[in-house]
Image (cartoon, rainbow, N blue to C red):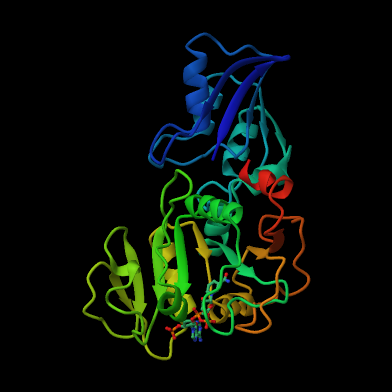
Amino acid sequence: MVGAVLVQGDRILAEGWHHRTGSAHAERDCLARFGDSPVPDDAVLYVNLEPCAHHGRTPPCADLIIERGVQHVVVAQRDPFPEVNGQGIERLKRAGIEVTEGVLAFEARWMNRRFLTSVTRQRPYIVLKWAQSADGFLNDHGRSARISSVETDVLVHRWRSEEQAILVGSRTALSDDPRLDVRHVQGRSPLRVLLDRKGITPKGAKLFDGSLPTLLFTSANRPVVGAEQMVVESGSDPIEAILTELNRRSIRSLLIEGGAELLMHFLRTGNWNEARVITSASALNGGTKAPRVPAPACRIASSSTDSIAYHINASHQTEPLAAWLW
Ligand SMILES: NC(=O)c1ccc[n+]([C@@H]2O[C@H](COP(=O)([O-])OP(=O)(O)OC[C@H]3O[C@@H](n4cnc5c(N)ncnc54)[C@H](OP(=O)(O)O)[C@@H]3O)[C@@H](O)[C@H]2O)c1
């Protein structure tokens, strides 16, 4: 997500943004909207990501900024993409343009945390989510239990719509038969991903109903329709296989909705960025133990690669949920 604003004094001259992959970058969009007249000498171009210096799907923005005579550029954060990574800023400076870096850098990193994680770690940004009872159980003595509230259901569907893929474990698919789609809010449903090497999920499961694409990680191809299958070689790490494949498909974010064992594998290997834990007010007095978020996960991140845990009370129906929904 990249935006650019051309400012003179306290007046906005033009704004632009990167509308979609392959379309004009934010700086180009902004300068096109500004029009053909010369850019005033005292105008400043603000952009949240370093202008590019390479010929990708569009020509380099750094060259355009130089051509248009912009004298001062404020950049919130460098682009870690290997073909840019400081070279855009360098090119502007060599052309005599004043460059100010690091303004609102934290906000810029947070906004683009999915992209930044994907580029720097070669895997999607990972959000773990589960709902637990007040005494820390995921289900009621092995049987599915209603832990969340109507409000958190809406919230979770919002979260689904914000990520590109969603993963569950085989025992969750077997016991809950989830659809993993987006129904309670308007938005795109993510790619459904299932890890089930032994093939315990029934052929008639909703994940195989063909209503949405499903990617099944299995140890041997199964005669299921409605799922694309990827074989995990025996002895290899299934999490590694999933993350490598999603990265190969340029999927930049993954929401993991359980169960406990699958979540624990991600927590143990440190392969996660956010844990969103919904806790109900009532106890279940037994069942599958919810995962524990390891210290020192904290509520406020100091960089986009820190892991953060959010604790959400299922019975809080207003203020904390409203914050998320906005
Ligand atoms: N309250 C909640 O938020 C919530 C959410 C989801 C589920 N649940 C409940 O949780 C229960 C299921 O949880 P569960 O812990 O029993 O099972 P689960 O996590 O759903 O399934 C176990 C998963 O662990 C995977 N696994 C096994 N060995 C692994 C390894 N070495 N590396 C990575 N992954 C590995 C399995 O893959 P293979 O099958 O390929 O071996 C399988 O996908 C159900 O009762 C469900 O209702 C609750």
Q: In the current view of this chain or complex, which residue is farthest to the bottom?
A: 235
Residue 137 at x, y percent in the picture: 65, 78
Figure check: 71 above or below 49:
above
Left of 3 or right of it: where is 292?
A: right
**Residue 108: quadrant of the picture:** top right
Q: Residue at x 72, y 49 (%)?
A: 320
Q: Does the rendering let one see residue 285?
A: yes
Q: Does the rendering let one see residue 109?
A: no
Q: Quadrant of the N terminus?
A: top right
Residue 136 at x, y percent in the picture: 69, 76
Q: Quadrant of the C terminus?
A: top right
Q: Residue at x 72, y 71 (%)?
A: 134
Residue 316 at x, y percent in the picture: 72, 53
Badge count: 0
Figure check: 14 above or below 124:
above
Work out whether residue 316 or residue 171 is closer to the camera in this orientation and state it: 316
Q: Residue at x 69, y 66 (%)?
A: 279
Q: In the current view of this chain or complex, which residue is farthest to the top?
A: 37
Residue 15 at x, y percent in the picture: 56, 22
Figure check: 151 above or below 216:
above
Q: Residue at x 52, y 58 (%)?
A: 118
Work out whether residue 223 or residue 228 is closer to the camera in this orientation and state it: 223
Left of 141 or right of it: where is 33?
A: left
**Residue 73: quadrant of the picture:** top right
